[in-house]
Image (spheres, rainbow, N blue to C red):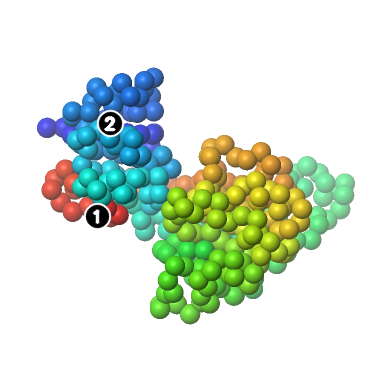
């Protein structure tokens, strides 16, 4: 019997095609009345497929009382109500590891772009200002920078390894100190911000971490400081960030994620020393294919009474 699943949001095209070829897929985002759709399919649906941004709230899951598995296209599961899932025996799979390299690569790209003002220099050249105004303004060297990583998990560690190639001084802030690295450890984020010039956010956030990187952290980071975010937008107080950059409290930022994406806080849009990306850290054909394959494998394993390949609950 073909299993019935609810798909919360559109996925990478080839992955969605395979999903639709093997399951009865109910597309939640296309429904004019989502509650009516959920009610009509509730008796049959055993699985939910979603991505890290949309997740699956307790409210959604309660409307599908026969759901047994949630397969997430992404590593982040902060938008999935894990407490509800654990309390109700619902398995939750995700796709770690396969996107680590791409996210780490983009983090370094944002560092270089923010320090060397690559987008500004591109526009300077294309607009003819090089010819009319002379050489572009000088920028800031990144090699040898004092960098702090908030969250030294899989992605944070991959970022750190890349930073070694730039001869950076590396610190990290975690709940617990790692015994397998020699980087400087801070248990307090503000203390680390005071000690570094570049703060890279790679933490797996929880709801209580909303806007934890705000005015206090920017003040600690100082006028030479830059913030790079490949974690989740909710971690940063975006209004405070824009204010800190405009006032010169910090020097700039490189952001791939935003609190209310795809909307971006308007105050961030016209700042020449801010580099913005539309949440594309894992956005390569190779990685999205690997993520899709792992998401599909998790789902298939569950329905075939096998253990999920990668799971958080």
Disc 2: which residue: 63
Q: Are marks 1 and 2 in contact (CB under 8 Å)?
A: no
> Viewer-nearest of labels 1 and 2?
2
Measuring from the top left, give residue 24's x and y in whole percent. 23, 29
Q: Is residue 168 left or right of residue 103?
A: right
Task: Pick the residue in front: 125 or 40.
Answer: 40
Q: Earlier in the sequence, mark 1 or mark 2?
A: 2
Q: Please tell me which residue lies in front, 112 or 189.
A: 189
Q: Is residue 290 visible?
A: no
**Residue at x 61% of width, y 55% of height:** 214
**Alpha carbon distance from label 1 to label 2:** 27 Å
Quarter residue 34 falls in: top left
Disc 2 on helix, strand or loop?
loop
The kind of secondary structure element at disc 1 is loop
- As displayed, is residue 204 above or below residue 71? below
Q: Which mark is residue 250?
A: none
Can you see residue 36?
Answer: yes
Question: Label for residue 309?
Answer: 1
**In which quadrant of the rendered image does the N terminus lie?**
top left
Residue at x-position 38% and y-position 42%: 55
Callout 1: 10 Å neighbours few (<14), some, many (20+)?
some
The residue positioned 25% from the left and 50% from the top of the image is: 86
Judge from the rendering whether residue 135 lies leftward or rightward of residue 56; answer left or right: right
Please state the horizontal and vertical placement of residue 195, each as a whole percent of the image.
63, 72
- Residue at left offset 44%, top offset 67%: 175
Q: Quadrant of residue 154?
A: bottom left
Say few, some or many: other residues with alpha carbon within 10 Å of mark 2 (under 14 / 14 to 19 / 20 or more): some
Task: Looking at the picture, tell me which residue is in the foreground, 222 or 284.
Answer: 222
Measured from the top left, where is residue 97 in percent x and y? Answer: 37, 58
User: Toward the viewer: 293 or 199?
Assistant: 199
């Amino acid at each position: 019997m073909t299993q019935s699943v609810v798909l919360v949001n559109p996925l990478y095209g080839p992955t969605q095609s395979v999903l639709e070829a093997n399951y009865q897929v109910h597309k939640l985002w296309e429904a004019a009345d989502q509650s009516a759709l959920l009610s009509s399919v509730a008796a049959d649906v055993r699985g939910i497929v979603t991505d890290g941004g949309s997740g699956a709230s307790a409210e959604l899951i309660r409307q599908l009382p026969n759901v047994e598995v949630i397969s997430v296209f992404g590593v982040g599961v902060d938008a999935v109500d894990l407490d509800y899932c654990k309390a109700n025996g619902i398995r939750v799979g995700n796709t770690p590891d396969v996107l680590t390299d791409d996210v780490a690569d983009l983090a370094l790209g944002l560092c270089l772009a923010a320090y060397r003002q690559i987008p500004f220099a591109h526009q300077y050249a294309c607009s003819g200002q090089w010819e009319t105004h002379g050489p572009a303004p000088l920028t800031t060297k990144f090699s040898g920078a004092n960098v702090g990583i908030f969250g030294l998990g899989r992605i944070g560690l991959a970022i750190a390894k890349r930073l070694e190639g730039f001869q950076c001084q590396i610190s990290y802030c975690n709940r617990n100190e790692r015994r397998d690295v020699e980087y400087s450890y801070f248990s307090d984020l503000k203390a680390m911000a005071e000690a570094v010039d570049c703060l890279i956010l790679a933490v797996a956030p929880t709801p209580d971490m909303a806007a934890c990187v705000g005015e206090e952290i920017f003040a600690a980071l100082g006028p030479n400081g830059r913030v790079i975010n490949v974690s989740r937008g909710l971690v940063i107080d975006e209004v405070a960030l824009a204010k800190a950059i405009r006032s010169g409290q910090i020097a700039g930022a490189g952001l791939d994620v935003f609190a209310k994406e795809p909307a971006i806080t308007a105050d961030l849009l016209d700042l020449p020393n801010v580099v913005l990306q539309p949440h594309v850290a894992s956005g390569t054909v190779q990685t999205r294919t690997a993520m899709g394959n792992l998401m599909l494998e998790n789902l298939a394993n569950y329905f075939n009474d096998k253990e999920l390949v990668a799971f958080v609950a």
